[in-house]
Image: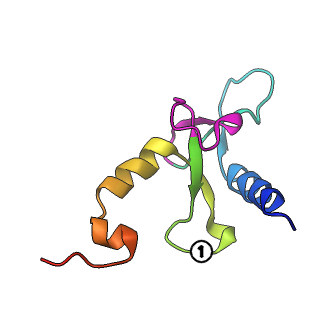
Amino acid sequence: MPIHAMLEDLKRAAWARTSPVSGQQGNSWEFRKDCLGNLVRFADYGNRHSPFGWEIDTLSTHDPDTFQALHWRAIAARSEHIPAGLLSGTAVAA
C-alpha cells in the first residue's frame, strides 16, 4: 500500500475518534472536537497556521488503534514540557 494511502487511512481512523459538534449544520464530518474539546477541521490536518489544525497523536504508543486527532496546539504544548533529550531520544548531559 502506498504511503499516501496509509496516511489517509490513519487520518480517517484518528478522525473517527473525534466527537461531533452539537448544533452544526451541513457536513457534520468537517468540524469535530478532539478529546480535549478543541474544535478541529478535517481539511486542516497538519496545518499549524489554522485555528482548527490538528495532527495525529499516538497516546504514547505506536499502536494504530490508539491514534487520535488532537489539535496541534495541544501537541505543541505537551512537547514544550518534555525535556529536549527525551524528544530526540538521547539524554542531555548535565
Quadrant in the picture for residue 5 = bottom right
Write the residue at 75% across / 20% down.
Answer: 25
Furthest residue to the top? 25
x, y (%) of residue 49? 51, 31
Furthest residue to the right? 1
Identify the amino acid type marked 1. His
Asked which secondary structure carries label 1, the reply is loop
Q: Is residue 87 magenta?
A: no
Q: Is residue 40 magenta?
A: yes
Q: Which residue is mark 1?
A: 62
Binning the other alpha carbons within 10 Å of mark 1 as few (below 14), some (14 to 19) or many (20 upward) gives few
Is residue 6 left or right of 64 when viewed as pictured? right
Q: Quadrant of the N terminus?
A: bottom right
x, y (%) of residue 54? 57, 43
Write the residue at 65% across / 47% down.
Answer: 18
Write the residue at 51% across / 40% down.
Answer: 37
Quadrant in the picture for residue 87 = bottom left
Region in magenta: 36-53
x, y (%) of residue 89? 38, 76
Residue 44 vertical placement versus 18 (above, below): above
Dominant SS in magenta: loop
Residue 71 versus residue 23: which sits nearer the camera?
Answer: 71
Write the residue at 68% across / 70% down.
Answer: 64
x, y (%) of residue 47? 58, 38
Is residue 37 left or right of 22 when viewed as pictured? left
Residue 74 vertical placement versus 49 (above, below): below
Q: Quadrant of the C terminus?
A: bottom left
